[in-house]
Image (cartoon, rainbow, N blue to C red):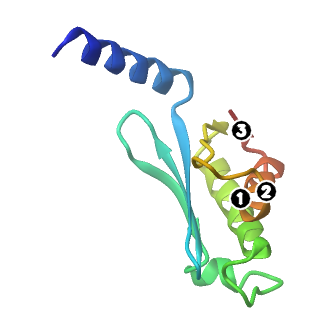
Amino acid sequence: MSNAELARAALRAARAAANPFTLHVSMSNKHVHAQIVRAVDGHVVASASTVERAVREREPPIRVTSDKVAARRVGEVIAERAKKVEVPEVRWARPYGARFHGKFASLLTALQSGGVGLA
């Protein structure tokens, strides 16, 4: 490995040690998906999606699986699941060119109000 590759690997390891969990959010035209991944080994420790029946049929049931209400529901469910596996806070990255509004903001706000910190 070159010195630049070693430096990048050391920086990645330092980031993973500082905050070991990362939030990955994916939104399609039909569904909202979220995963919390352990940075050290890439293991998914919690996930939620509007594809799941448990998310869709929770009271009150949602009809549209791709709007802000559905994103908020995914945020609430993943916050509960993250607290069960003792995830105190997650690191997240705003997608390039995207603004902090709409479905993304609804999901993160629900996650934060569910007791999971954002870094």
- Tell me the amino acid under the disc marked 3: Leu
Assign a secondary structure to mark 3. strand
Alpha-carbon neighbours of circle 1 within 10 Å: few (<14), some, or many (≥20)? Answer: many
Residue 107 in percent (x, y) is at 73, 59
At x 58% / y 79%, what residue is drawn? 29
Residue 88 in percent (x, y) is at 67, 37
- Tell me the amino acid under the disc marked 1: Phe
At x 79% / y 56%, what residue is drawn? 101
Q: Is residue 43 left or right of residue 59?
A: left
**Camera-side residue of 87 and 34:** 34
At x 70% / y 57%, what residue is drawn? 80
Whole-number angstrom distance, CA of label 2 to CA of label 1 = 6 Å
Whether pointer 2 and pointer 1 mark residues with C-beta atoms closer than 8 Å, the reply is: yes
Q: Which residue is at the far top?
A: 3
Whole-number angstrom distance, CA of label 1 to CA of label 3 = 13 Å
Alpha-carbon neighbours of circle 2 within 10 Å: few (<14), some, or many (≥20)? Answer: few
Q: Is residue 37 left or right of residue 62?
A: left
Assign a secondary structure to mark 1. helix
Q: Relative to 3, does residue 53 appear above or below in the rendering?
A: below
Residue 84 in percent (x, y) is at 63, 51
Alpha-carbon neighbours of circle 3 within 10 Å: few (<14), some, or many (≥20)? Answer: some
- Dot placed on the residue nearer the N-terminal end, 1 or 3: 1
Assign a secondary structure to mark 2. loop
Q: Quadrant of the N terminus?
A: top left
Q: What mark, if any, has residue 118 been given in the picture?
A: 3
- Tell me the amino acid under the disc marked 2: His
At x 61% / y 42%, what residue is drawn? 92
Q: What mark, if any, has residue 101 been given in the picture?
A: 2
Q: Relative to 28, does residue 106 appear above or below in the rendering?
A: above
Residue 91 in percent (x, y) is at 60, 37
Q: Which residue is mark 1?
A: 104
**Camera-side residue of 45 and 27:** 27
